[in-house]
Image: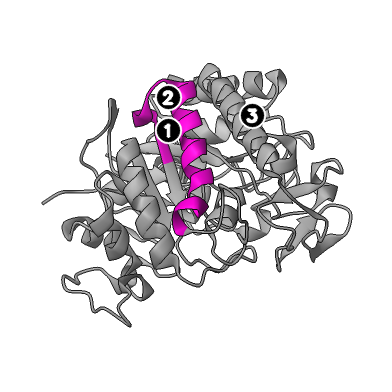
Amino acid sequence: MASLFDEFQLGDLTLPNRVIMGPMTRAKATPGGVPTAIMATHYAQRASAGLIISEGTWPERRGQGYCDIPGIATQEQEDAWRTVTDAVHAKGGRIFLQMEHTGRVGHEINNGGLQMVSSTTERADFFIYTHEHGMIPMTDNVHELTTDEVHEVIESYYQAAVRTKAAGFDGIELHAASGYLPHQFLSDVANGRDDEFGGTARKRTEFTVRVLRKLIEAWGSSKRIGVKISPNILFNGISEDRPDATYSVLLDRLNELDLAYVAFQTPESLRSLAGKDNPEIVDGEIWHRYPYEFIRERYDGVVIASGDLTQELAQNALAHDKADLFVFGRAYMSNPDLVERMRHGWPVTPVDMRRAYGSADAEAGYNDYPTYEEEMAGQGHITA
């Protein structure tokens, strides 16, 4: 039976296992979006993952919705990311950059005062943290991109992809989920446009597909480019009336691109799927209760699953061919050796979320979680 600890061939990249360290915003960059030295330490500590996907990283400054998240739009940022990738590679790891333009999600307080942009002028009905005022409603000063401006944003992804490759990453994951800019174009609620980027399901997918083509062009290979989607997830003020129509078209178009993978997060976890071979169709739409099946049936390539996974759930899902690779997020915050802990049945350290975010020079709650062997050594034990 296939195991989470089997090698996996992801295009021309050999992964030593199927356990993926998922992208997690930790707000450890400088206010201007430059990665810091402690970030290099953090990712290198977790290099035994089959693949690391970095925290969301903006391709242009207007795409910085959160405070202290990194960018990949300047030479200084590129050079700082090179320190991170070098550290990961020195430990034998592999790392993709997650490219994240938040669009209307966030507040201009966090990006130096730039007006945020979207497929629409409608604000995201959600809240955002700022250093100045704590949690506040997301900005209501949203600029609807003109058609020409949409093309300019797409070009910014291309330039960021060129820098990503120069910084030594092994590939790119486009964040087209969680209510961020590509998702704002995909949504049949947020996107009311009547130009080439809206009006029909196919046109709503156009922004995401064109960005992916630009990433492929910059990299020179489609097999080092992945995409994350989240059909019908209610987060960051996003909603979708008929996600089945949109994502059927999108998945067909992603098949044509021959990507490294499609990653996804849905409102449901694998708890609703593990061990189920015959999903029910509800109101003619399989995604309502079984979105994993919806994606697996329509996408021909590698599928990465995420969403409150445990080792048992992931292994069951692999056994039933629900996905190929599995993302673990919070568990990686407090377990730099998560793969080893799962492989040997060692206990998993719970994360202290009170220390999870912020301060570019604070390693507490970030780099101070020991491996299991370090724990045992500290207690005078010897592990095999």
Q: Residue at x 34, y 30 (%)?
A: 223
Magenta stretch holds residue 145: no
Considering the image in quadrants, where does the C terminus appear? top left
Amino acid type of disc 2? Answer: Lys
Q: What residue is shown with label 2?
A: 91
Q: Residue 47: which disc?
A: 1
Horizontal relation, residue 274 to residue 137: left or right:
left
Magenta stretch holds residue 203: yes
Q: Residue 141: which disc?
A: none
Amino acid type of disc 1? Answer: Ala
What range of the chain is rendered magenta?
A: 201-226
Amino acid type of disc 3? Answer: Ile
Q: Position of residue 30 (x, y in %)?
A: 76, 34
Instruction: Measure how far apart labels 2 and 1 are at the Cα level.
Output: 6 Å
Instruction: Measure how far apart labels 3 and 2 are at the Cα level.
Output: 23 Å
What's the magenta bit mostly, secondary-structure-wise?
helix
Q: What residue is shown with label 3?
A: 72
Given residues 124 and 188, the one toward you in this image is 188
Question: For residue 18, what is the image quadrant?
Answer: top left
Query: Within 10 angstroms of label 3, few (less than 14), some, or many (20 or more) residues?
Result: many
